[in-house]
Amino acid sequence: MATKTYTDHVAGEHGVLIEAKLMAWNAKNRREGQQPRPDHCRLSALTIEAGRYTLAAQALHWLTVFLILMILPVAWVMMSLPEGPEQSRMLVVHRSLGVTIFAVAVLRLAWRPTHPAPPLPSDTPRVMQWISQLTHWLLYALLLLMPITGYLQSGDGRPVSYFGLFDLPALPKDKALGDVAKVLHLLGQWGVYTLVGLHVGATVWHVAIRRDGLLDRMIPPQDQSGALR
């Protein structure tokens, strides 16, 4: 009872919207022959409605998603091309996207101390909370490591073009450091695949199986009709 009283207080003015969402969820469950779980859904919805990410954090998150979806196919195409002008152009795009991802990751980390992530629903198992935190911080580390190692590979004394708009500072030629960076970059690539896959899988689990509305934390508030508000 104490938990419900607390979450009722936290929900505040969002209570009516939450109850409407719960009614819709339960009606959908009944139509599909599933048993509604009002307590589970209610606690999750209250936590999410009261603990949504800020709009700035949401924008930076979806920008990161967009950039990752851009840089991966660019890398695959780049690696499939023979050496020549086409591959060089794709390399410029790949490096530029990597630098952009690095800048966005730094912005997200700078934003985080003053705008911490909202808590997970109170009924989330502790092990799942630990896994969520671990995968998020590992992904942050890779979003920094991959551009750094990519930039170090470019340490051949020539400046690095940013989408052809301007040049980033050249690094002194260091073959040994470049070789180490290349290995770390290749290993980090598989780390990105793994962590992004886990992140997407967890999202699907919350949306399609658990149905706790957790994805709502990372999208702007909506009214009962689904329109942004």
Image: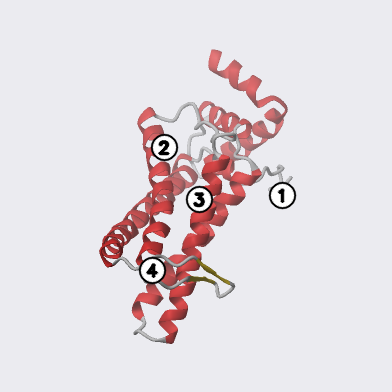
Label 4 Cα neighbours within 10 Å, binned few <14 / some 14-19 / many ≥20: many
| Nearest to N terminus: mark 4 or mark 1 | 4
Give the quadrant of the N terminus.
Answer: top right
Identity, as a three-letter code, of the amino acid under mark 2: Gln
Q: Is residue 107 left or right of residue 14?
A: left
Badge 4 amino acid = Ser
Q: Is residue 68 above or below residue 126?
A: below
Reading the image, the residue beneath label 1 is 227
Q: Nearer the viewer, mark 3 or mark 4?
A: 4
Image quarter of residue 26 = top right
Across and down, in percent, residue 193 comes to 36, 57
Q: Residue at x 47, y 74 (%)?
A: 92
Among numbered discs 1 and 3, the one appearing first in the sequence = 3
The quarter holding residue 166 reads bottom right
Please name the residue that numbered disc 3 is placed on: 105
Between the residue at mark 3 and the residue at mark 2, the CA separation in whole angstroms equals 16 Å
Tell which residue pokes out farthest to the top in this image.
2
Query: Which dot, 4 or 1, sits closer to the camera?
Result: 4
Left or right position of 134 against 62? left
Marks 4 and 2, how far apart at CA: 32 Å
Residue beneath label 4, please? Answer: 154
SS label for mark 4: loop
Where residue 31 sits: x, y (%)? 55, 44
